[in-house]
Amino acid sequence: MKKRIKIFICKGTFYTILICLICSLQSCEKFLDAKPSSKLDKMEPDYVPDLLDDFDIMNNRYPGEIENCTDDFFLLEAGYNALASSKYPQDLYLWKGEAQQTIIAPGWADSYKVVYNANLALETLAAGTGSLDPTLVNTLKGMAYFFRAYAHHQVAQSYAQPYDVATAGQDAGIPIRTNTAVEVKSERGTVKETYDKIIADFLQALPLLPVTSTIASRPNKAACYAALARTYLSMQDYTNAGKMADECLKLYSVLIDYNSVSKTSLTPFPRFNAEVIFHATLSGSLCANPVRAKIATDLYNSYEASDLRKVVFYKTTTGGFRWSGNYNPVTNNTFFSGLATDEVYLIRAECYARANNVAEALADLNTLKVKRWNNTVAYVPVTASTAEEALRLVLAERRKELPFRGLRWVDLRRLNKDPRFQTTLSRTIGGVTYTLPPNDLRYVLLISQSVIDNSNLLQNPR
């Protein structure tokens, strides 16, 4: 009972503390009867494992608003109109410049809750480790650094400019929290500072984490390498992204043979399936909910007839096809957004292609594709005569393999920096066509109004 009470206290005070973390101190007085203190939540070391193992907090509801904005699906007029009481997702769906949450966006709030818990764990262990085994202490520290970096990176994909080496030192980043001292005001800093800290945390976690975990909700070395690969990819640092992907696959490289996967189920993949290196989910995306979202025609038609993803990932529904390829086995909009081997293979393949290593890029591409191929039909390996042809094949495969994981928006942001791969998005509702050109300011979401009203944080430009 003592343990339960202690954890309850941490959770019960958090939402108040969260406001303090993102707001200036003077504004927090609106929410608190007394001046906030960094002494609000202190823990005994024995409780740190439970804090970091809290699946509901640490592994779920990372920013998912961006899934409303991608080109992987469309809404019929009836589906769009059914969201009339939810103006924010409707505005996101049409990329309206004024799209903004009034209250704190769940993905923002829950991600900073992860950051707070990670900081609380690190501070507790720094003050003393009690009776904890030294090996476990290292693991716990590694987990905390990993979770802090992972949450900050997820927030940056929605609320900071995409990384551009030419402007990263000036572009506004996100608030980076490295302690629980609520009297310290949050500042946005720059995109470069944001990514430098994310990478530093992952690198600090790496030697502390075990090679494997007993369950995929706990980070390990393979997950850390995969997270670094994803982070470097979002920075267009393809050399380091490729190196990290390679290190990950040296530790864990299992791919599922889709011939063994149900072709009829709406939830064909179990949670923590064999490809999952680290499990995480996104906060809800009402427009992208498979109940109403119809798969984009160009995406569906991009699969070959013998590609099993065409029947595993998609099911016929009124007005088109619905999504059923979630690595989180639910039928709603709680999408898997964690780290899995299929993504890591594609990161390494892309980096090989960009480094003119055509044979290696194609080897990774074919290793993945053959596992998705109907084994009653002979698989013919894909070929390419140039590095650019190989790169285009890999990028096409990324879209086919990784929809509804929070990655398509990130890909559009970075690929739009290259004129060869720029995409103009377009949607029509009520006879009006809305577009989103490459590199538009709307590729960065507005921070919730309540955060802006109660803080000194700068809003993203429009």
Image (cartoon, helix red, strand yellow):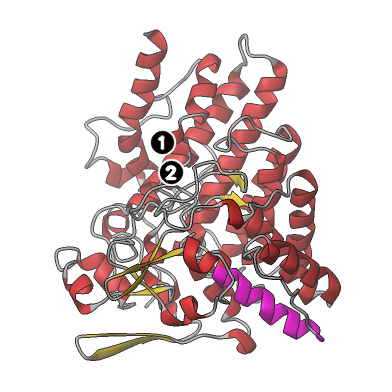
Q: Residue at x 60, y 69 (%)?
A: 398
Quadrant assignment, res 284: bottom left
Is 167 or 253 nearer to us in this picture?
Answer: 253
Whether the residues at callouts 1 and 2 have beta carbons within 8 Å, the answer is yes
Residue located 44% across and 74% down the image: 443
Dot label at residue 60? 2
- Decide: is 127 above or below 296: above
Residue found at the far front of this picture: 376
Residue 303 at what x, y percent from top left? 55, 75
| Residue type beneath disc 2 | Asn
User: Position of 192 compared to 458: left or right?
Assistant: right
Picture quarter containing residue 459? bottom left
Q: Residues within 10 Å of mark 1 (few under 14, many from 20)?
A: few
Q: In front: 300, or 438?
A: 300
Q: Main secondary structure of the magenta part?
A: helix
Residue found 79% across the figure and 82% down from its top: 387
Frontmost residue, 355 versus 194: 355
Q: How far apart are the two marked residues, 1 and 2, measured between alpha carbons?
A: 6 Å
Q: Amino acid at mark 1?
A: Asp
Check residue 238 in the rendering and tell me which mark sits there, or answer none.
Answer: none
Callout 2: helix, strand or loop? loop
User: What secondary structure is found at the residue carrying circle 1?
Assistant: helix
Residue at image mark 1: 56
Task: Give the residues in magenta.
Answer: 385-400
Locate residue 352, reporting x and y percent.
79, 70
Work out whether residue 188 can be spotted.
no
273 relative to 245 in the view: left or right: left
Is residue 15 on the magenta stretch? Answer: no
Name above or below for residue 317 compared with residue 421: above
